[in-house]
Image (cartoon, rainbow, N blue to C red):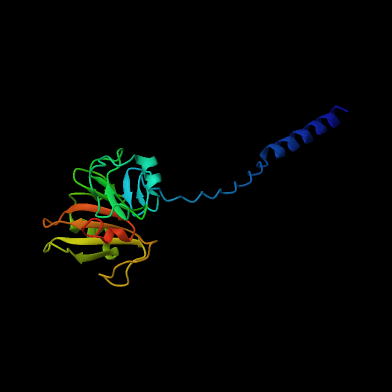
């Protein structure tokens, strides 16, 4: 009887040892989670783009411009020969050096000159060189001679919508949007214009 119990106990020990030596089943591999696609960063609110600046969007009505940044900071000034058709002025809450152009009651252009330190979404503003702008934009730049000054003065256009087929062709499409860097005779930016076809005007509203 004692021998039988001993045999049973020995068998149990062998079975326990075998069970302990069996490797645990490996955990199921985790299903990889696809990373969410990165959204392109939106331009900061304080930079100039072909679509506008801050709360100002090309295509706004004059009333919307006034609501966004205030009325004419100098209502006694004349911004155009026919203000009801085309007018330029600085909204009361806009930085110094910023002018809006209103054509037929609609915001068509924003211009930035000294002493403004505003930059475009590519990091260029008053005082930057034409060479740096051309290097950054490459073939997207359309260079045109300045109407009144000899080289190195010139106009550098970067159209995002409604690009001309050839350099020098006047863009008529009201939906066109672009940036014009007006280069002075020192080879540096003196004015930046953003907006629609009105950025091509060289004498304010004319």
- Dividing the image into 4 quarters, which one contains the C terminus? bottom left
Q: Position of residue 121 (x, y in %)?
A: 32, 50
Please name whichever residue, 42 or 68, is drawn nearer the observer in this view of the structure: 68
In this picture, residue 153 sits left or right of residue 98 = left
Residue depicted at 19% across the width and 43% down the height: 115
Residue 154 sits in which quadrant?
bottom left
- Give the farthest residue toward the right: 1
Please name whichever residue, 9 or 68, is drawn nearer the observer in this view of the structure: 68
- Give the farthest residue toward the bottom: 166
- Give the farthest residue toward the top: 2
80 to 55, vertically: above or below = below
Residue depicted at 33% across the width and 41% down the height: 71
Q: Position of residue 111 (x, y in %)?
A: 26, 51
Q: How many marks?
A: 0
Q: Position of residue 139 (x, y in %)?
A: 28, 66
71 to 168, vertically: above or below = above
Please name whichever residue, 198 or 191, is drawn nearer the observer in this view of the structure: 198
Q: Position of residue 40 (x, y in %)?
A: 42, 51
In this picture, residue 52 sits left or right of residue 3 = left
In this picture, residue 112 sits left or right of residue 102 = left
- Dividing the image into 4 quarters, which one contains the N terminus? top right
Residue 95 sits in which quadrant?
top left
Residue depicted at 39% across the width and 45% down the height: 63
């Amino acid at each position: 009887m004692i021998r039988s119990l001993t045999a049973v106990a020995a068998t149990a020990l062998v079975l326990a040892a075998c069970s302990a030596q069996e490797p645990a089943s490996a955990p199921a591999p985790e299903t990889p989670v696809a990373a969410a696609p990165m959204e392109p960063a939106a331009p900061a609110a304080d930079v100039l783009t072909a679509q506008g600046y801050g709360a100002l969007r090309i295509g706004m009505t004059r009333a919307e411009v006034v609501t966004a940044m205030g009325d004419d900071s100098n209502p006694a000034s004349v911004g155009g020969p026919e203000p009801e058709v085309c007018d330029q002025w600085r909204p009361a809450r806009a930085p110094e050096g910023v002018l809006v152009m209103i054509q037929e009651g609609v915001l068509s252009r924003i211009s930035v000159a000294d002493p403004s330190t505003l930059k475009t979404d590519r990091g260029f503003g008053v005082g930057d060189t034409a060479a740096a702008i051309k290097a950054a934009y490459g073939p997207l730049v359309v260079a045109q001679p300045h109407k009144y000054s000899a080289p190195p003065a010139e106009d550098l256009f970067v159209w995002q919508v409604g690009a001309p087929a050839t350099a020098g062709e006047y863009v008529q499409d009201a939906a066109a949007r672009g940036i014009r860097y007006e280069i002075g005779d020192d080879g540096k930016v003196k004015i930046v214009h953003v907006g629609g076809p009105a950025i091509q005007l060289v004498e304010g509203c004319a």
